[in-house]
Image: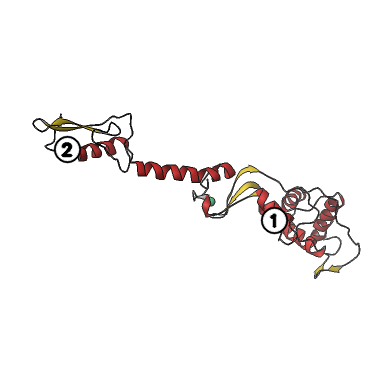
Amino acid sequence: MKTYANKSNAKRAAIKAIVAERGVEEAEVKANADQYFAIEGDKDNGFYPHYKTERVGVSEEKEKQLKAEREFDEQYIEKFGTAHCPHCNVHLENGAWTFDEALEEHLDPKSSAFPEMFTHEFLCLGCGEEFGEERELPVKGEGIKIEKDRPEQNGIVRPSAGGKCRAIWDFCDELNEKGVMPMPKLLKEAAREKGWNENNAVIEMYQWRKFHGIVGRQNTSK
Ligand SMILES: [Zn+2]
């Protein structure tokens, strides 16, 4: 066994050993405190470091810091199921949104139609990626009253009959008559079925909405 001429050298050796063995950044030893470490030996025979391996040699300060971090993370884990974005690994403290928060904004008459891009439970504002379960906006409603035969409204001209654009508008009309608000997801599905260009279908859907003065909140219910 390696011995040291004085207590402080033995203590230093013990700290080094604990750090190496435990893979921790720092360790604290307390001579004869039976907590982290005990130096054994005597002046004549030299001191040797002895520590109890069942007690992890992480300093109290470090322990406190780790505990505080865990507690801080808990609120995010409770809300988002994780404290870090599963895509970019940024801490969600950086900014994250839940579907329900977005929906609430969405239903607020003063807000924009932004949450339509939401398809999952959570959104990381760091990378813009979503995670969690898939979610859908509520689409059932009463349908807005449509005045037929108005070729121009809100600066938008209704496409003429027979064209592809008009077919998309007619599809939006049909949805609305069923009390379903035309949503990007629905238009993309229809586009795949009917052979429309998906982006065009969504653009026309927004034209249709603008024509009818819909800013995204009407015709949706919780
Ligand atoms: Zn992210």
Is the residue marked by circle 2 packed among few (<14), some (14-19), or many (20+) residues within 10 Å? Answer: many
Q: Is residue 197 visible?
A: no
Residue 105 numbered mark, or none: 1
Q: Nearer the viewer, residue 99 or 206?
A: 99
Coloration mode:
secondary structure
Q: Callout 1, which amino acid?
A: Glu
2 vs 203: above or below = above
> Mark 2 falls on what kind of element?
helix
Residue 7 numbered mark, or none: 2
Q: Callout 2, which amino acid?
A: Lys
Image location of residue 206, percent across then percent down: 75, 60
Image location of residue 184, percent across then percent down: 72, 53
Outermost bottom residue: 155
Q: For this view, does 202 lie left or right of residue 82?
A: right
Sequence order check, earlier mark of 1 and 2: 2
Q: Quadrant of residue 217?
A: bottom right
For the residues labelled 1 and 2, the Cα–Cα distance comes to: 65 Å
Q: What residue lies at 13% left-to-right and 38% top-to-bottom?
A: 6
Image location of residue 106, percent across then percent down: 71, 55
